[in-house]
Amino acid sequence: MAERRTRYARDPLGLKRALSDRLLPGLVAAMALLAALALAGTHGAAALKERWQQGAAAAVTVQLPPEQSGRMDRALALLRDMPEVASAEPVSPERMRELLRPWLGEVPALPLPAVLELRLVNPNIDPAPLARQLAEAVPGAEVESHGLWVARLAALARSVQAMALVVLLLVAGVAVAVVAVATRAGLASRRQAIEILHDLGATQDYIAGRFARRIGLLAASGALAGAALAVPTLAALAGVAAPLAGGMVQPWSSLPWLDLVLLPPVAGGIGWATAQVSVRRWLRRLP
Amino acid sequence: MAFPCRMVRFSAVGLRYPSPDGATGPEALADLTFMLPEGSFTWLLGASGAGKSSLLRLMHLALLPTRGELEVLGERVRRDRRAALPALRRRIGVVFQDFRLLPYLSAFDNVALPLRLSGRSEASLRPDVAEMLRWVGLQGRELALPQQLSGGEQQRIAIARAVVTRPALLVADEPTGNLDSHQARRLLALLTQMNRLGTTVVVATHSEDLVAQFSAPALVLEEGRVVHHG
């Protein structure tokens, strides 16, 4: 019995009954899951952009026709002397066969072109003058630049990132609206209790603090559930997206753990602040 | 400057309630000018609708005047200093006509509420609340919820809540409305005892029997105006 008295004494506004411990956390959990997906999308797009820019943006392929493969050393020397070339390395015949095997199978007799892989000091360098100089020295040599595609892919990744951030902002906005509606519902159902406490000398800080604490806790618990739900979801998505990242992704290590850990306190903070503002605005009507 | 012997002072006070369409309605109270000294006992009399409850609500700061000057507990009440009002309210005990108990709190917690709002520790408030419940004859009903109590018992809980902080000013709106004559006499004894201990007491009532039992100055209201004081 004394236990019941203590429990009630800690909740003089009866908020445990007035503010549902299912609906608000459920909604916040769904929003936290969406936020986690958006955050993971932001990180994923950023990682892909980085990988494409670092890995492919500076990469230029030079192909020498089979009849010119004997002039590989000359081509290499010429390219390495060029100031815009950071590195130039031949692609070994074994690696070429490895790369072609999925498409052509084992074809040891197939004459393969000699291929060089270049990295430019700056991905924005126009490779056309380099290609001209090389073609003069080694007739038939072709330079393949990925720059245009890389730029398009990077723009795509940036768009994905921007969209994910917009989704994140929308989720935060909806969270504020949901908390505000829940707070208003709580205020409506506890109007008389608030007026009684107010008449007995409760301050605005006291009343707003009670609401904010309760709603902050509900929002944080909802976000915790959402974040927990996000872990297997994101791990599965990371597995699906592994080929895009070169097939080297470890699902668990690639998750945005810090963001997931921060979701509950951030949701709790949003709930606390929104409830404080809503309740204080409502209390203005009292003398 | 606040005058220490003045517990309540009204000076040309008027009160308007907003009308349902949002505009200001007629004055419920008009040109109230009077003073209640510290330690006084005052009956507030008048027909239904005369404005007794509105006047009491001004006294315990549940409403603020729309014009005039109001001083309670020696402090001038100002709309632009609302942050100072909760501390004043905590020094005023109120017995509401409709009890206004919190239905989900036990009798003990309802009585303890003003002490908790004042920041009293749990350990220190328990003896005071228990004593107050004993004083109103409800020892053993500490854990009962209001709906488990009779109207008279709820009224006594409301009275215990009003006096548990030993307020400097106690206002009661029809406090005997739900009590039988024995309980009403007992309540009057409690109020006069509080008054003897130094509390300024204002009691609004319709009961001529109650007024006849204790001789004290009366403030008589008629259509929102004071027609007699003394």
Image (tube, rainbow, N blue to C red):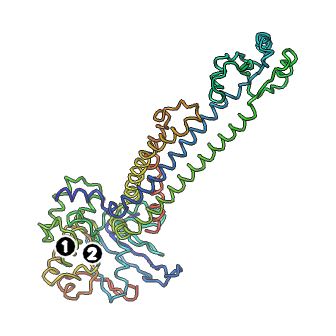
Check disc 2 and give the amino acid type: Phe
Q: Give left or right: position of A141 versus A210.
A: right
The disc, 1 or 2, on the residue closer to the chain's N-terminal end is 2
Q: What element carries label 1?
A: helix
Q: In which quarter of the image is residue B101?
A: bottom left
Residue that sits furthest to the right in the current view: A136
Give the camera-side residue of B52 and A164. A164
Residue B27 seen anywhere in this rendered image of the structure = yes
Q: Which of marks 1 and 2 is in front?
A: 1
Position in image of residue B225 (x %, y %):
40, 85
Give the camera-side residue of B5 and A148. A148
Residue denoted by label 1:
B148
Q: Give left or right: position of A130 versus A207.
A: right
Q: What element carries label 2?
A: loop
Q: Residue at x 14, y 63 (%)?
A: B131
| Labels 1, 2: one chain | yes
Position in image of residue B163 (x %, y %):
23, 67
CA separation in Å, label 1 and label 2:
14 Å
- Quadrant where the C terminus of chain B sits is bottom left
Q: Which class describes the residues within 10 Å of circle 1: few (<14), some (14-19), or many (20+)?
A: some
Query: Which chain does the numbered disc 2 sit on?
Result: B
Position in image of residue B182 (x %, y %):
12, 82
Q: Give left or right: position of B172 versus A37.
A: left
User: Pointer 1 and pointer 2: residues touching (CB < 8 Å)?
Assistant: no
Query: Which chain does the numbered disc 1 sit on?
Result: B
Position in image of residue A150 (x %, y %):
71, 34
Give the camera-side residue of A240 and A110. A110
Residue B99 is tagged as 2
Vertically, is A164 above or below A181?
above
Vertically, is A242 above or below A132?
below
Check disc 1 and give the amino acid type: Gln
- Quadrant where the N terminus of chain B sits is bottom left
